[in-house]
Amino acid sequence: MKKKALLLIALVVVIGAASLVGTLWKKKSRARNSSFETAVVTRRDIGSSVLATGIIKPQVGAEVKVGSRISGVVKRLRAQIGNFIEAGRIIAELDDAELQAKVNQNIAALEKARADLEYAGLNQERQRSLLKKNYISQQQVDLAENAFKIAQAQVEQAEANVDFARVQLSYSKIHAPVSGVIASISTQEGETVTASLAAPTFVNIIDLRRLEVQTYVDETDISKIKVGQEAAFTVDTYADTDFRGKVTAIYPKAIIQDNVVNYIVTAEITDFQDKILRPEMTANVTIFLETRKNVLAVPTAAITRIRGERYVTVLEGETKVERKVRIGWRDVGFTEIISGLSEGEKVIISQE
């Protein structure tokens, strides 16, 4: 009898302990399930964007190769790599002794032609005077008039020769066609340059105020890009500065690397933020697409994806309800809700 009583007492103790443990576990589980963060469904502006990597390049016409139109020896070079040069400034000078001599030679020929013209004019008047007195024939007058016309043509030819020689002389001084920074120098003082079919290059000038960003946009996003859209980008050397730009062109031909298809989108730099940018800098570009005004939105972290459908957990009183939603555009941290939620409802973001 004593053994049965002891067994009964032990059984009661075990059942009580199990019940107590179960109660404590349920309370702990309930407390754990009640620890979550919520957000209210509100209206806000949602702006979509495309992120891509780009490279800063000179615009068309911003990089100019400056060369010589004539052959000769470089007498003086007034350029150093990295120097800023204004448009019209002399970059280099060729030895102009021969060209100056040709100018002088043609000026002398012009003076002789003018003297010949003056004599031909006097002779013409003399022959006409003698004809009036019947001392000579009409043929002699005609010869004098013809000689006068030939002398006039010779003066015009001599004047053209002088102009041409002076133009050739002006080519001995090479001027900067645009303002910019000297990017490279390919000719030195004392070298002989030969101008044949192509002008020999002296220096390269880049106008750092006329730069653009060539952005590589994935084929999945290229349909969203339109000319005129605003853009922003950063470069490593000015990591805390946002530069502004505007899309100016979309290249029709794709760039394929490692089986990845990209299209080049160029963006003109509209705000340099008083900084100096240089070609070939890597840019992290954001192209801003259309902005949707006053739409329902929730934090993106509140949305889960199950078998291709999107759901949120809505808090209805103390009850959590899974609800299917249809989403629209995404912004940084927020997603547009097209259907499935109403303004003011609470959704669960995270649960511990």
Image (spheres, rainbow, N blue to C red):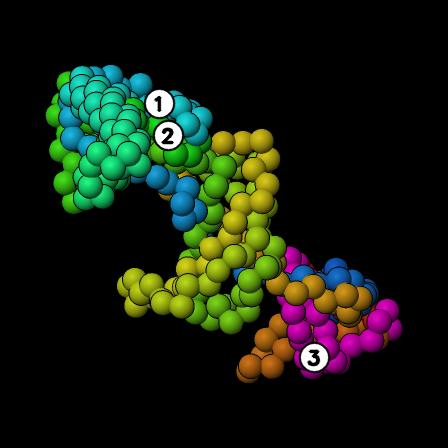
Circle 3 residue: 325
Circle 2 residue: 176
Q: Judge the density around disc 3: few (<14), some (14-19), many (≥20) Cα neighbours within 10 Å.
A: some
Secondary structure type for disc 1? strand
Q: Nearer the viewer, residue 102 or 26?
A: 102
Q: What mark, if any, has residue 98 been given in the picture?
A: none
Residue at figure coordinates x 12%, y 25% from the top left:
192
Q: Amino acid at mark 2?
A: Ala
Residue at figure coordinates x 51%, y 52% from the top left:
267
Rounded to the nearest angstrom, the CA distance separating label 2 from label 3 is 63 Å
First along the sequence among labels 1 and 3: 1
Is the residue 57 above or below the residue 265 in the image?
A: above
Q: Is residue 9 magenta?
A: no
Q: Judge the density around disc 2: few (<14), some (14-19), many (≥20) Cα neighbours within 10 Å.
A: many
Indicate the position of residue 111 as horizontal and vertical percent values: 25, 22
Please identify, in this view, whether the residue under mark 2 or under mark 3 is nearer the observer. Answer: 2
Indicate the position of residue 97 as horizontal and vertical percent values: 18, 17
Specify start and end residues of the magenta stretch as a single range.
Answer: 317-344
Residue at figure coordinates x 22%, y 34% from the top left:
135
First along the sequence among labels 2 and 1: 1
Q: Main secondary structure of the magenta part?
A: strand
Q: Is residue 127 left or right of residue 183?
A: left
Circle 1 residue: 90
